[in-house]
Amino acid sequence: MGAYKLTSAAQREALLSLDKLSKDEFQGYFSFSRSDVKFILSHRGVENRLGIGLQLCLARYPGISLNLVDKVSNSLVQYVAAQLKISTTDLDNYLSKKNTPLVHLKKICRQYNYSLYSPKASDYLKNILNEAIQENNDELFLINLAIYRLREQHILLPELSEIERLISTIRQNHEKYLYKKIIELLSENQKEQLDSLLVVNLDTKKSKLAWLQDVSGKPSKDTILSICNRISVIKELKLEQLTFSFTNEKRLSQIARLTERYHAFDLRRFEETKRYALLVVYLIRYRKALIDLAIEVHNKIVQSIKRSGLHKKNEENKKTGEQSNRMLKHFSQVVSMLEHAICNNDFQNLARQLKQSFDWNELIEEGQQAALIASPRKRTYMGLVQYKAQYIRGYLPRLVETLDFKSTRMDDDGLINALRLISVLKKENKRKIPVDIELSFVKKPWQSLVKNPDGTIDRSYFELVAATELNDRLRSGEVIEPQSVLHQELGNYLVSSNAMMGSHTIPDTFKEYLSSRIEVLEERLETYQKLV
C-alpha cells in the first residue's frame, strides 16, 4: 500500500479535519433536529447515545465512519453531548465493542439513506476521476474531488489509502494513454532529432538539451542572438505543427513543469514512449518561454537606450541653462552701459567700454547662441542616441527573422513591413532604405529625424524608431507573437466555450450555474430550518 501514498500524514489529516469549518458550517453539519434526537435517544446507555450521535455527525461531515478516526475532536464530542443533554464519557469502551459501532452505523445508513463504499461506488468514482484527470492530475485536487463526490452521493468514505490507490492507478493509465497519443504524432525523423538532444558532446561535456537550457537573462544583443539560436533549433523539429486535441493546455503545462526537473541523463533512462512525450511537450512550452524572454530582453535594451537619451537631454538642458545665465548677465551689463550712455549723452565712450568689458567675437557668438536657444524647437531624446543604431542593428534583424510578429491593427501603418525590410537589408548586406517605404508608424516628433529634407531615409533613425515602436506595441498588444505566452492575441487568453463544456469547475451554461447555486441555497435553508 505504501507505493500508492500520494499525500503526507499532515495532508491526510487536513483533508478530514473539522478545524477548517466555520462556526456556521460546524453548526449546520452537526446540529440535530427533533427527529435526529429521537432516533439517537431510542438507544439505551450514555456511551451508545454519544457514539451513535458522533457517527451520525461524522457521516455528514467529512463523510466517514467512526472507526476511521484516530482521535475524535473534543469540540464535536462536547457539542453532541450538549444537544443530547448527556455527559461526555470516554469513547474507548464504545469503540472496543466489536459489533455495536457497526450495528449503529448500519442503522444510520438505513435511517438517513447512506451507503458504505462498495465496488459499485468504486466504479462511479473511476468514471468521475477519469474525466477530471483530463483537466488536472494533481493528487490533492483529485482526492478532494473524490471526497466531495462520494459525500454528495451519501457514500461513506473508505480509507484514504484506498482512494489514493485508485487515483494512482488512474493516473498511471492516463499517463500511458497520453504519452502514446503524443508519440503517434511524431515522425521517425523527429524522434531521431529528439534523441540527438540527449547526446553528450565530448568537447563541451554537455548535451544539446543542456545547451538549450543554458540561457542568460542579461540585457544584451549577445543574449538575444543566443536565444534566437536556441529557438531556431527547436523550430527545426516542427513541433508547432502537432495538435493535441485529445487533452487540454492545463494538462500539457503540468507535463512540461514535470519535465523541467529532469536532466538529459534522467530522460535517457525512461522508456522511449515517455521520453519522447515529455520532450515534445517540454520543448513546445520552452520555445514559448524563450520567445517571451527574447522580447523581454529587447524591451530592456530599448528602455536602456531611452534612459541614455533622456540623460543626455537633461545634461544638454543643464548646459543650456548655464549658458543662458551667463548670457543674461552679459546682457544686463550691456543694457546698463547703454542706459548710462543715453542718460549722459555719451555715446563716444560706449564702444570703448564694450571692448574693455567683453571680447567682441565672444559677444557676437553669444548672441548667435541666444538666437538658437530662443528659437522654437522640440528636440526629443531620439535625436541624441543615433549612435545606438549600430547596437540595435546587431540583433534586430535576427530577432525579426526568428520570431513571427503580427499586427493586430485594422490599418496597416507599415511597422511589420519595416521590420522585415531591416532583416532583408542585413541579410543582403544593403544600406539604403527605399524612399517609398511606408512611414506612418513613425511618430510626429521623430519624422524629421527619419526623413531627411532631400527625401532620403536615415537608416540609423529608421531602425531605432522601428525597434522602439515594436517594443511599445508589443507591450500594448498591437503587435503579437502567436507562439509566445505573454504576447498572444487577447482572445486567446479567454476561456473558450468548448474548453468549458464538461468542466468539473465551470458550469456549461448560466442556467446550470443558477441551478447549482439554488441547490446550495435550498440545502442551507433546510439546515437552518432544522436548527430553528
Image: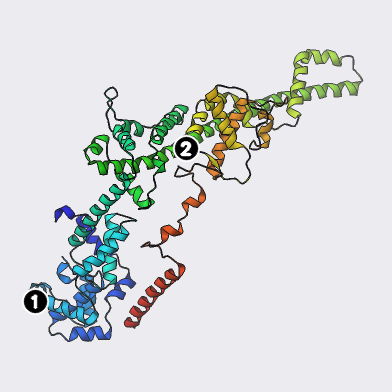
Residue at the extreme right: 345
Count how many numbered circles sit on residues in the image.
2
Front residue of 480 and 71: 480
Name the secondary structure under disc 1: loop
Residue at point 11% right, 75% down?
94
In the figure, 402 relative to 95: above or below? above
User: What residue would you read off at disc 1?
Assistant: 99
Residue type, label 1: Asn
Q: Position of residue 25 (x, y in %)?
A: 32, 71
Residue at the extreme front: 188
Front residue of 191 and 348: 191
Left or right: 474 in relation to 169: right
User: What residue would you read off at disc 2?
Assistant: 296
Left or right: 341 in relation to 63: right
Of labels 1 and 2, earlier in sequence is 1
Residue at point 29% right, 28% down?
206
Q: Which mark is residue 116?
A: none
Q: Position of residue 49 (x, y in %)?
A: 16, 81
Name the secondary structure under disc 2: helix
Query: Which image quarter: residue 270?
Result: top left
As measured in the structure, the alpha-carbon distance from the residue carrying label 1 to the one carrying label 2 is 69 Å
Q: How is the image coloured?
A: rainbow
Residue type, label 2: Glu
Q: Position of residue 213 (x, y in %)?
A: 35, 34
Residue at point 36% right, 62% down?
504
Q: Quadrant of the N terminus?
A: bottom left
Front residue of 482 and 225: 482
10 Å neighbourhood of mark 2: few (<14), some, or many (≥20)?
Answer: some
Q: Quadrant of the C terminus?
A: bottom left
Left or right: 460 in relation to 226: right
Query: Which image quarter: residue 5?
Result: bottom left
Q: Position of residue 384 (x, y in %)?
A: 62, 27
